[in-house]
Image: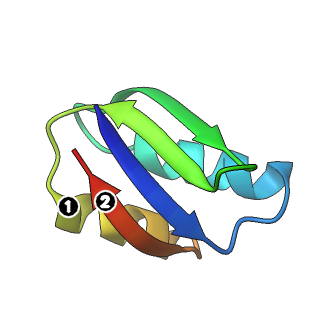
Amino acid sequence: MKKVLIEGMSCGHCVRHVKEALEELKGVSKVEVDLATKTATFEGDVTDAEIKAAIEDAGYDVVKIEG
């Protein structure tokens, strides 16, 4: 399970954008994005660079990636 701390999310629309961006990555599943904690958690075998690129392309900043 990977956990990503994200800056820049402020509404449900933002949550949807981040979730969709991560779901588009091949091999990613069970994506959950929490606005209150500004985190996304998911399962998948993707690199930190792929995660960061997907989230930043959606318009948000990656603060930290764990897992």
On the image, the x and y values in percent for residue 4 come to 41, 54
Left or right of residue 35: residue 41: left
Q: Which residue is mark 2?
A: 65
On the image, the x and y values in percent for residue 18 come to 58, 53
Q: Quadrant of the N terminus?
A: top left
Residue type (three-letter) at the residue carrying disc 2? Ile
Left or right of residue 53: residue 41: right
Q: In terms of secondary structure, where does tag 2 sit?
A: strand
The answer to whether mark 1 and mark 2 are in CB contact below 8 A is yes
- Is disc 1 surrounded by few (<14), some (14 to 19) or many (20+) residues within 10 Å? some
- How far apart, in angstroms, are the residues tagged by discs 1 and 2? 7 Å
Q: Which residue is mark 1?
A: 48
Residue type (three-letter) at the residue carrying disc 1? Asp
Q: Is residue 1 above or below residue 51?
A: above
Q: Residue at x 48, y 60 (%)?
A: 5
The number of numbered discs placed on residues in the rendered structure image is 2
Of 23 and 62, which appears nearest the observer? 62
Image quadrant where residue 47 sits? bottom left
Please state which of the two labelled residues, at mark 1 or mark 2, is closer to the viewer: 2
Of 31 and 25, which appears nearest the observer? 31
Q: Is residue 11 above or below residue 61?
A: above
The disc placed on residue 20 is: none
Q: In terms of secondary structure, where does tag 1 sit?
A: helix
Looking at the image, is mark 1 or mark 2 earlier in the sequence? 1
On the image, the x and y values in percent for residue 59 come to 59, 76
Q: Residue at x 56, y 43 (%)?
A: 19
On the image, the x and y values in percent for residue 11 come to 85, 57
